[in-house]
Image (cartoon, helix red, strand yellow):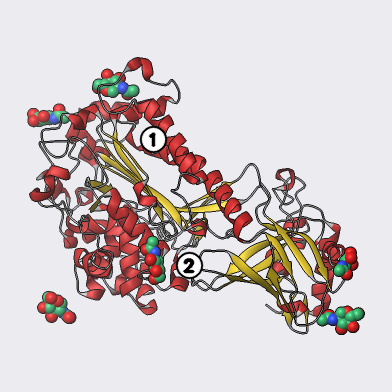
Amino acid sequence: MHISLHHTFALVAAQSLITGVLGDFSGPSFPAPRDLTSDQSLVKTAWNSVTKAIEAQVCGPSPCNKRKRASGSSILEAARNITFSIGLISIHDPKAPSLQFHHTSPEIAVSTKGTTKVDDKSIYRVASITKVFTVLAGLLKLSDAEWERPLSNILAPLSNQNNNGGVLSTPWDKITMRALAAQIGGVPRDGFPNLGEIALQIRQTNASEARVMAITGLPPSSIIDPLSIPPCAAYVERNENCPAEPYLQGVANRAPTFSPWSTPAYTNNGFTLLGLAMAAVTNQTIGKLYQDNILDPLAMASTFSDPPPTSEYPRSVIVDADTGFVQPNGIFVSSGGVFSTTQDLARFGTGILNSTLLAPERTRRWLKPVSHTARLQYAVGAPWEIIRHVSPVTNKVTDMYTKSGDSGLYSSWLVLMPEYGFGFSILAAGTSLSRFEVVATLADTVSQALLPALQQQAEAEAARNIAGTYEYSGPGELNSTLVLTAAKDTAGVVISSWVSNGTDVMPYLTTIAGPAPHRLLPSVDYDARPGQVAFRRVGNVDSPATSTGGLETGALFAGPGMAAADWVLIDASTYYGAGLSLFVFDVASDGKATAVTIPVYRVTLSRSA
Ligand SMILES: *[C@@H]1O[C@H](CO)[C@@H](O)[C@H](O)[C@H]1NC(C)=O
Ligand SMILES: *[C@@H]1O[C@H](CO)[C@@H](O)[C@H](O)[C@H]1NC(C)=O
Ligand SMILES: *[C@@H]1O[C@H](CO)[C@@H](O)[C@H](O)[C@H]1NC(C)=O
Ligand SMILES: *[C@@H]1O[C@H](CO)[C@@H](O)[C@H](O)[C@H]1NC(C)=O
Ligand SMILES: *[C@@H]1O[C@H](CO)[C@@H](O)[C@H](O)[C@H]1NC(C)=O
Ligand SMILES: *[C@@H]1O[C@H](CO)[C@@H](O)[C@H](O)[C@H]1NC(C)=O
């Protein structure tokens, strides 16, 4: 973007008039914390207390002592009847996966098939977390041009359908694999027939059609076009998987939910189609794509794209002993077919966050939203369900890249927080109808306990590693000193005093960047290679009262969100080519800074305290 000098000065001038400048980069306010598991770690402390609270709600493994059971969230009480495993993920603390919590429900404790006590090697169905495997396999195997291929060009039954271009026709020639991966293709939500198909429900529950008609006002089946009986119906009736061809014929002529690239709209069918398209383009089964590109390289030996073999049953969480893990997934593997363990999901999450399979810049691109929903705190990626947490204390926004799963008797959540190199998984099983709600509540409980702890631990480590006094140490004399602090709840290392060659720089900082605190945020670390970390100086943390950036006054264009936006002004002011906001720290392998170079001042200051 070209910014004229005039424009730059106008923005700088406007910024200095505004208090409560937004800190609007979406990233860390400190280097990610490294110690999540020692007895001194605030994350470990928070984990211990949140798991103790969960334990009190579910009352431990049966038999439950009623007197000990805490009263609290009724949803967490329902967790007692659900078997679940929670495990932490971190690329900075290799011991983090040892922080786990497992609860075996009475139902599983007496199961006649599979495990009767869960741990991190217990195999659950992960359901729609599978969609992350599918997209990652695609990122590893498909070229950019392949991602842009329309489905009509890949899957024959979608090319010769009777597409008249009307609102009831799904435009398969405009829907690309990339759009499907980001849940924005507008394709029908599910295959046909699907679980939400009322005719199927009538047959499955043996309800009388007349009674359903009386409640719903829907017309009787006798007057419905027999062509609307989907080609897959016969397979579904026989409890068999529908093969690709009839499946595609069944969805080809269904109405779209939206035009492609209009709005995210969740679709399992989209991921079935994506899997079929990937298999066609690569000439490999989706299972083999997972195995060769993800499971083998990440040593995820307990992860399966179809129900695991019976030799794995002793450690499998099997809710229904009659059906076991039911039949193979057929064409639905790519949407929800994966089985895995807490231990393997830690390997998976670590592999993603540590860029083990994808280059770091491709990982960062992947961990970004693709589109908005109308809810400000919820965006959608490929296939990420992105939940934005706002700290009530510092107003800092942390994006959580998550994927939920819910299928049959299993629910799950994978949660990644890229800025902390951290995440967690929850795997759950049980017949309870509250199962998914319980998993969602557990995800809230765990993230709300750990987010402040991660931030405070990062702050505490920054106080030890970055904060301190940096002084000029020769050659020659120069009265230059920079003092940095990492005080509580500042959401960044703060410049508390700065003298350059005898001149107090603080009044100048206030002129160019508004009132203190002046924060330094990590900006470039060359992908965790120790040695140097760059930081950028940014404006004040916005106070909660002004957090809407002008929403309450209606000033979206003129408010602080625009006129003082850090992201617009970053690096706008320079002196002989060096940015005024750039600070580069020399960092030893233990994370401790030894010196800071301030390129615009052409000076390196050594850390003296
Ligand atoms: C757990 O299941 C038992 C047996 O089905 C039931 O009696 C009880 O009410 C359930 N508890 C909760 C909290 O849902
Ligand atoms: C992350 O990747 C780096 C560099 O490849 C490696 O040294 C490190 O062990 C990895 N961390 C984890 C937790 O796997
Ligand atoms: C529906 O009817 C069939 C045949 O009579 C029976 O086997 C099945 O158990 C019934 N299903 C339900 C849910 O009642
Ligand atoms: C696809 O794979 C099959 C089986 O591996 C092989 O026989 C066939 O030649 C492949 N087709 C193409 C076009 O590569
Ligand atoms: C420090 O200030 C003195 C006095 O203004 C000036 O002569 C000198 O060039 C400055 N040195 C540096 C390195 O800024
Ligand atoms: C360095 O400069 C500061 C700010 O002008 C001044 O207060 C301090 O006395 C100076 N120190 C030395 C050793 O000259």
Residue 118: x %, y % from top left: 23, 39
Q: Which residue is painted at 71% across and 78% down in the image?
A: 599
| Left or right relative to 427: residue 319 | left
* Residue 139 vertical placement versus 18 (above, below): below
SS type, badge 1 = helix
Q: Does residue 503 appear in this view?
A: no
**Where, quadrant-wise, is the C terminus in this rendering?**
bottom right
Mark 2 C-beta to ligand 2 under 8 Å: no
* Residue 417 in view in this figure: yes
Res 493 quadrant in image = bottom right
Q: At 23% from the left edge and 36% from the top edge, which residue is drawn? A: 201
Q: Which corner quadrant holds the N terminus?
A: bottom right
Image quadrant assignment for residue 332:
bottom left
Task: Give the residue at mark 1.
Answer: 437
- Residue extending farthest bottom: 576
Relative to residue 540, is residue 579 depicted above or below?
A: below
Residue found at x 23% / y 72%: 280
Q: Nearer the viewer, residue 9 or 488?
A: 488
Q: Amino acid at mark 2?
A: Arg
* Label number found at residue 364: 2
Crowdedness of circle 1 by 10 Å Cα count: few (<14), some, many (20+)?
A: some
Give the secondary structure at mark 2: helix
| Foreground residue among 101 and 326 | 101
